[in-house]
Image (cartoon, helix red, strand yellow):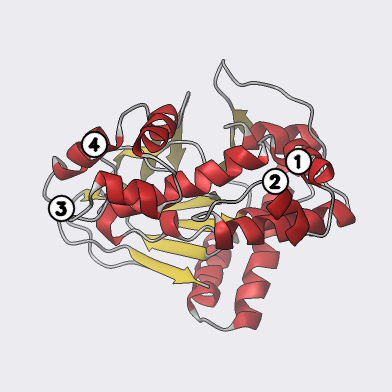
């Protein structure tokens, strides 16, 4: 399952791929890295802890995972690993948003997850170690049939959490809004909407462009997306731009103005205001914090991005 671990590991943001590719399935299997600063991405994240301890700081609550814990959270809100045990070993699977709506969860649970709650189940089955190792191998195989099979089984495993002892952790400021699980027609529309936005968020697009890509009326596009995700179309476009910008800022030669333009923001001020809203700091401060990160020991983490 793993190699020799000689100490805690620190996350190396320059090697991360998940922030820049919202439609890609990414699997990271190994020793979790402690993060110097928060990050966010446009995928749902699934963690399973094979052994040890992994401590997260989410936007408004703490999550402490131990051996055998399985958790699910929406990666679009800032989060970071703040500490681990030296023997920690886990898998983090970043699942594109469109698959989230395939889950047959209650509308209330779905809505709370999209608003920032964390779903946790622990010690539910002896097969989880075997299954997550197998899914990791399937995802890393680059064989479409194996990858699809892994996703299908993973989603079924997540659905089963609601029938087991579980916890839904949420901050005291969690907003509750009307939401609903999408029907088949709505799910198809959401899939086309997400695909179009992922391909075009760096360009100047609006709700009309997005709706046309799904062959639906703009008002219906805005309504079905808001009810299903808790986000407006503009908020989702901004999230993808911010996630992409974050990935560019992680590079050593990043220039904040160029990052703003390359990420689809029309001006530096718009980028700075939007970035500060989600990160709680300016892009320049974010860059500085990354530069001040500690020297990292050799990593055992294997990240497997897939198209």
Residue 155 seen in the figure: yes
Residue 115, given in percent of the width and then of the height, sits at 62, 31
Residue 2, given in percent of the width and then of the height, sits at 33, 66
Q: Given this view, does label 3 or label 1 mark the residue nearer the observer?
A: 1
The disc, 1 or 4, on the residue closer to the chain's N-terminal end is 1
C-alpha gap between disc 3 and disc 4: 22 Å
Residue 296's disc is 3
Q: Is residue 263 left or right of residue 192?
A: left
Secondary structure found at label 3: loop
C-alpha gap between disc 4 and disc 2: 30 Å
Secondary structure found at label 4: helix
Q: Is residue 188 left or right of residue 136?
A: right
Q: Given this view, does label 1 or label 2 mark the residue nearer the observer?
A: 2
Q: Is residue 173 left or right of residue 253?
A: right
Task: Answer few, some or many: residues within 10 Å of disc 4's Cα (few below 14, many 20 plus, some between 14 and 19).
Answer: few
The disc, 4 or 2, on the residue closer to the chain's N-terminal end is 2
In terms of depth relative to the viewer, which is nearer, 246 or 86?
246
Do labels 1 and 2 touch, CB within 8 Å?
yes
Residue 284's disc is 4
Q: Residue at x 82, y 40 (%)?
A: 219
C-alpha gap between disc 3 and disc 1: 44 Å
Q: Given this view, does label 3 or label 4 mark the residue nearer the observer?
A: 4
* Whether residue 245 is situated above or below residue 229 in the rendered picture: below
Do labels 3 and 4 touch, CB within 8 Å?
no
Residue 57 seen in the figure: no
Task: Answer few, some or many: residues within 10 Å of disc 3's Cα (few below 14, many 20 plus, some between 14 and 19).
Answer: few
The disc, 3 or 1, on the residue closer to the chain's N-terminal end is 1
């Amino acid at each position: 399952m793993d190699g020799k671990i000689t100490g805690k590991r620190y996350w190396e943001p320059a090697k991360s791929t998940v922030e820049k590719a919202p439609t890609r399935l990414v699997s990271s299997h190994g020793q979790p890295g402690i993060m110097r600063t928060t990050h966010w991405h446009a995928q749902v994240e699934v963690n399973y802890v094979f052994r040890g301890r992994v401590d997260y700081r989410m936007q408004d609550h703490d999550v402490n995972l131990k051996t055998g814990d399985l958790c699910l959270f929406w990666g679009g809100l800032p989060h970071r690993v703040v500490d681990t045990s030296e023997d920690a070993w886990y898998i983090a699977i970043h699942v594109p948003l469109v698959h989230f709506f395939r889950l047959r969860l209650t509308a209330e649970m779905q809505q709370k997850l999209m608003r920032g709650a964390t779903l946790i189940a622990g010690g539910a089955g002896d097969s989880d170690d075997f299954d997550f190792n197998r899914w990791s191998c399937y995802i890393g195989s680059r064989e479409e049939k194996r990858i699809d099979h892994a996703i299908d089984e993973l989603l079924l495993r997540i659905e089963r959490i609601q029938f087991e002892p579980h916890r839904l952790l949420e901050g005291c400021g969690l907003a509750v809004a009307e939401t609903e699980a999408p029907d088949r027609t709505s799910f198809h529309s959401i899939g086309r909407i997400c695909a179009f936005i992922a391909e075009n968020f760096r360009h100047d697009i609006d709700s009309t462009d997005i709706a046309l890509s799904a062959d639906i009326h703009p008002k219906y596009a805005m309504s079905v997306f808001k009810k299903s995700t808790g986000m407006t179309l503009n908020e989702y476009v901004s999230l993808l731009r911010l996630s992409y910008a974050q990935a560019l800022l992680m590079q050593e030669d990043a220039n904040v103005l160029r990052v703003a333009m390359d990420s689809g923001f029309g001006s530096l001020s718009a980028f700075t205001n939007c970035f500060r809203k989600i990160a709680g700091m300016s892009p320049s401060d974010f860059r500085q914090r990354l530069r001040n990160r500690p020297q990292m020991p050799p990593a055992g983490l294997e990240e497997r991005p897939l198209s």
